[in-house]
Amino acid sequence: MTKKSQPIPGRHVIWFGWKLLIILSVSLCVLALLRLQSQPDVSSYSPSISRLSRDNFNGHPKIAFLFLARRDLPLDFLWATFFENADVASFSVYIHSEPGFVFDESSTRSHFFYNRQLPNCIKVGWGESSMIVAERLLFEAALGDPANQRFVLLSDSCAPLYNFSYIYSYLMASPRSFVDSFLDTKDNRYNSKMFPIVPKEKWRKGSQWISLIRSHAEVIVDDEVIFSIFRKFCKRRPPLEASKGKLNLKLQKQHNCIPDEHFVQTLLAMNELEHELERRTLTYTVWNLSATKMENEGWHPVTFNYANAGPQEIMEIKAINHVYYETEYRTEWCRSNFTSVPCFLFARKFSRGAAMRILSEGVVGPFDASALLNYTPMIWGF
Ligand SMILES: *[C@@H]1O[C@H](CO)[C@@H](O)[C@H](O)[C@H]1NC(C)=O
Ligand SMILES: *[C@@H]1O[C@H](CO)[C@@H](O)[C@H](O)[C@H]1NC(C)=O
Ligand SMILES: *[C@@H]1O[C@H](CO)[C@@H](O)[C@H](O)[C@H]1NC(C)=O
């Protein structure tokens, strides 16, 4: 009885506490709203909407071969035979090279490359964001032709390991892009200044050599937001140089990032498109693990030459049917549209000698020795 009539000493305090809490939460909400409005870019990365109008192409689809070259294309004679064994309605060629470099009779042995360089080439710094600009220029130019439905990015030292018809069916059968993409727990290239637009859980790493379906090429070209973040916060640290002496110590403390090993992978992850990917590259590369730090950023690819590009070596590459991703404990069984396929269609880095060898072995098509007679023997450089 007494309990009921007795005033509860704490009641006022509790009520006051509630009022305070309500006022506090309301003001927090208002503050949060104000904050959102003042920084619209922070709250919202909205994935780009693909240009649906162009996606309903009903004609004969083409593969766009996009060459990212330093200058000329040293393996043009190999690609010439590759393209000669193809239907011209099934492919197109685009080249990004040094600004002003012209592909014509005087600079290439194959008419497939004549005047195929972009008119708007830029100067590319290897490992810098200009590399991504060049890649995007290639994708953009190739998107101009609605027949282009697959987009293969290649370097000037990439060689095809199969004939055209094989590569065409492989790529066309897959409704997905081929993009090497993984999480690297040991990776310290993510720059926390990219947060919150690029959160760490979307940060990916992978080979630059990709093959895309059309809608993904559009995502790469249309993006402005992620690229501007990369340009600011993903920069390559200058390599060690003996001449710089003590300055090296300071330089090596800078954050190091190689944009072309992260941009496409991260952008596609940010757009929630990873389920539309085969998460592996089509381009085989062997890494030389014994290179020293002083030489560059550590590892660099082994070059194939005449001696190590024989039938046995090429057969071994072609026999690879899975790739193991150590950092994710992920085994990627190589598939194209759910059918088991060899993992690699291309390989790098090929010297002219190596390209000569696979050409004469008939790897990319019937070998026509007479075609080689036109070439000056001096330029081979085995
Ligand atoms: C292309 O290569 C595939 C597999 O290596 C082979 O089966 C096919 O006969 C070749 N096609 C042509 C046109 O040479
Ligand atoms: C992929 O495979 C499915 C089932 O086997 C088939 O119906 C489809 O046409 C294939 N897609 C392409 C692009 O070939
Ligand atoms: C690997 O790199 C080392 C050091 O640069 C070099 O001496 C060696 O020849 C390279 N090996 C191959 C297979 O390229």
Image (tube, rainbow, N blue to C red):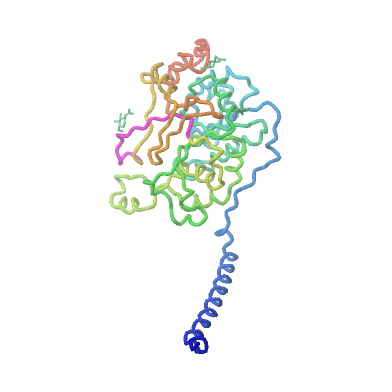
**Residue 40, position in %: x, y?**
59, 61
**Residue 83, position in %: x, y?**
57, 20
The span picked out in magenta is: 280-296
Q: Which quarter of the figure has residue 147?
A: top right
Please say whether residue 282 is one of the residues in the magenta stretch: yes
Please say whether residue 104 is one of the residues in the magenta stretch: no
Q: Is residue 353 visible?
A: no
**Residue 268, position in %: x, y?**
54, 43
| 143 up-or-down from 162: above or below | below
Left or right of residue 348, residue 225 in this image: right
Q: Which of 260 and 119 is in front in this view?
A: 260
Quadrant in which ligand 2 is drawn? top right
**Residue 192, position in %: x, y?**
44, 55
Looking at the rendering, in which quadrant would you find the C terminus? top left
Tell me what residue is drawn at x 51 percent, y 23 percent.
76
Tell me what residue is drawn at x 56 percent, y 29 percent.
337
Q: Is residue 28 visible?
A: yes
Q: Which of 240 and 244 is in front in this view?
A: 240
| 131 up-or-down from 357: above or below | below
